[in-house]
Amino acid sequence: MAEKTEQVMAEAYSQGLPYSLEAEQSVLGSVLIDPELLSTIMEKISSPQVFYTEKHRRLYSLMIRMFSESKPIDYVTLLEEARNEEIFDSDASAQSYLLHLMNQVPTTANLTSYCNIVLEKYYMRGLLTAATDIASSVREGDGNASELLDAAEQKIYDIRQGRQTSELRPIGEVIIGVYDNIYELNRKEDTRITGLASGFHQLDLILSGLNRSDLILLAARPGMGKTAFALNIASNVGIKYPNIDIAIFSLEMNNSQLVSRMLCSEALIPSDKMRTGRLEKEEWRNLAAAAERLTNTHIYLDDTAGISVSQMKAKVRRLKNLGLIIIDYLQLMTSSTRIENRVQEISQMTRGLKIMAKELNVPVICLSQLSRAAEQRQGHRPMLSDLRESGSIEQDADSVLFLFREEYYADAEEREGADDSIRNTAICIVAKNRHGSTGDVPIGWQGEYTRFSNLELGREAPPF
């Protein structure tokens, strides 16, 4: 038996794969000594694939099956099941090996340590396999450097995610957590907003704020101000929550254009003056103050054209305290795989965005264009069916918001004669809301500053 043990270990290390035969044998042997320990092992080792040798994988799988079928597990019953499964070449080798497993265990008191060793070796093998795959992809030229880097980060991320497993918890512990959460909510100014406050109070009341793992779709026709609205949200959140990281991916405008817009909106300086640089003394002071406020935020910008979901995910993982992702906009993104059908490609990307929001546990705001259908409709009010290349956009999104300005569709004469209620207002239409009701949210619009703001709708709307 000792010779066979040395042979197995030699084969493992000759392949360069980390492996502990003694730890694996001690884990399995502990079950034969005390079958009650199997439940402890299953909490740590969820899959037979964690074991290195095929024989151990099959034995552990057999133990799990017997456990699920409420069959007793001991030397005799496991031997009989192993015969039926033909795990060993002969009865003699089966008897010899099961006895060896029992004799191999130094003490069952250290079972958790044995499991940890088996797990550590499994993750190290995963890292080695991932590194080998990455090296092979580089040698064979499977994609450009950017795609290979994204694939490499994804492989490492998948291994890291595999280590995060949840365990059964007594309800008392969960109750304490819920109680603490209720207590914290009670201390908040407005308990109706459970997520990040966007800065638009009436919208936050309907959505309960920007909630973790939500995919929020913000759609409008060109010129309605969806980029301005998204940047206003980014500034509001960044200033209110200075410790969280906000990632903005702009596929249409470069970083300088984005920052100019944000400064214009924050400093209340007309956009034409920002373009010419002809500012008054007071405006220079306002600009400096706005620049300081934005500099103190943790807003990060990326203007990579045609970026994919996997590339975004790879970049935002580097942020330590990620709290919000904004993407401008969906139709300019590219898929990580080649799909000829555009509707299927958009559907794949929205599914990827929803998965990213859930994996990273942050709200994702994705901007989207609307089709021309609203242009021909009386009143021009957008509808869910107007989503371009809709596919699964509506299905994947937790919330769908439309921006609509009546002034946009008025001709020059009508604009001149329009009152302030039309000229300086917009509507954010909550067309879908997985967390509650839908409806219209009137908001202020200051076109010269490319800025949206709260309207005074009553005493309950506090300043942001």
Image: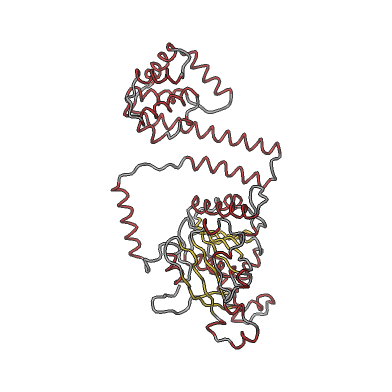
Colour approach in the figure: secondary structure
Residue 115: name its quadrant. Answer: top left
Residue at 40% across, 43% down: 166
Percent x, y of residue 88: 46, 17
Q: Is residue 272 shown left or right of residue 128?
A: right
Q: Quadrant of the C terminus?
A: bottom left
> Is 274 situated above or below 106?
below
> Is 342 situated above or below 386?
above
Percent x, y of residue 299: 55, 62
- Residue extending farthest left: 172
Q: Which of 180 and 242 is in front in this view?
A: 180
Percent x, y of residue 324: 51, 59
Residue 46: name its quadrant. Answer: top left
Q: Is residue 398 shown left or right of residue 335?
A: left
> Is 451 situated above or below 356?
below
Percent x, y of residue 62: 41, 26
Q: Is residue 187 shown left or right of residue 274?
A: left
- Residue extending farthest top: 92
Q: Can residue 286 be seen in this view?
A: no
Residue at 28% across, 48% down: 172
Q: Nearer the viewer, residue 372 or 170?
A: 372
| Number of residue marks | 0
> Is 141 situated above or below 238?
above
Q: Can residue 438 be seen in this view?
A: yes
Q: Nearer the viewer, residue 165 or 400?
A: 400
